[in-house]
Amino acid sequence: MDFDTKAFRDALGCFPTGVAVMTAAPLAKASNLKEAAETSHIGITVNSFASVSLDPPLVLWCIDRRSRRYPYFAEAPGFTVSILASGHKAVSARLAGQGEHSLDGIALVPTKLGPPGLADSLAIFECARESVQDAGDHAILIGRVLRFSRNDGAGAPLVYFRGRYGALAQGEPPA
Ligand SMILES: Cc1cc2nc3c(=O)[nH]c(=O)nc-3n(C[C@H](O)[C@H](O)[C@H](O)COP(=O)(O)O)c2cc1C
């Protein structure tokens, strides 16, 4: 069957989403403790984040298995989800760059479980890896939320629609 993958991708882009950055500590890649301690956390921009279950509290996102970042996230014991605000556009674009997984110079906030979140995010979810399921050229990462926080002062969310960043039509929603 002829299937136009580019047209499929463009059609999927008609579904407006928020934008999140996933962070993880690639400790599994370090061959010794010293190396592990010196290893920096990594990040990736995604719009495949979704809620799954309230009880138990589960979320998911999908990662391209061809991504250089895939082995780190697939093996990490957990990941942190940062829901981006409209002011995060440049950070989002940077962490979507080819090979641009470093968090150097990005404003971060520490978390209790390990991987830091991005400062001024709308919400942060600290997750333990529940499962990784292959799904075509992507993998579905399911995380169990162990801790979370909200920051209603962070303003309007960053929005992604038809391959471009945008904003909610009414601007910052009422609290
Ligand atoms: C708004 C936006 C959303 C994205 N969502 C995803 C996603 O859900 N899953 C994914 O694997 N890559 C996603 N990407 C692509 C990655 O951010 C990044 O470009 C890719 O991993 C780069 O390749 P590398 O990991 O090999 O360096 C998204 C990019 C943008 C700009």
Image (spheres, grey):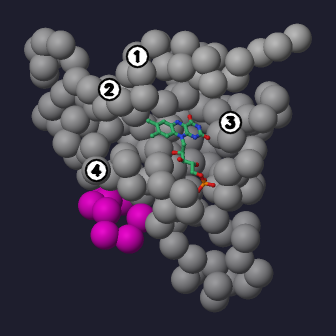
Label 2 CA crowd tier, 10 Å (few <14, some 14–19, many 20+):
many
Label 1 CA crowd tier, 10 Å (few <14, some 14–19, many 20+):
some
- The span from disc 1 to disc 2 (Cα, nearest Å) is 7 Å
Q: Position of residue 97 (x, y in %)?
A: 48, 55
Please give the residue where the numbered disc 2 appears in the rendered image: 159
Amino acid residing under circle 3: Leu
Image height of 11 relative to 167, above or below:
above
Q: Are marks 4 and 1 in contact (CB under 8 Å)?
A: no
Q: Quadrant of residue 83?
A: top left
Please give the residue where the numbered disc 1 appears in the rendered image: 16
Q: Earlier in the sequence, mark 3 or mark 1?
A: 1
Please give the residue where the numbered disc 4 appears in the rendered image: 90
Q: Earlier in the sequence, mark 1 or mark 2?
A: 1
Can the viewer see residue 111 in this picture? no
Q: Are marks 1 and 2 in contact (CB under 8 Å)?
A: yes
Numbered range of the magenta stretch: 103-112
Q: Of 77 and 155, which appears nearest the observer?
A: 155
Tell me the element at label 4.
helix
Ligand 1 closer than 8 Å to the CB at disc 3? no
Q: Earlier in the sequence, mark 4 or mark 3?
A: 4
Image height of 1 relative to 48, above or below:
above
Image height of 151 relative to 36, above or below:
above
Q: Position of residue 14 (x, y in %)?
A: 46, 13
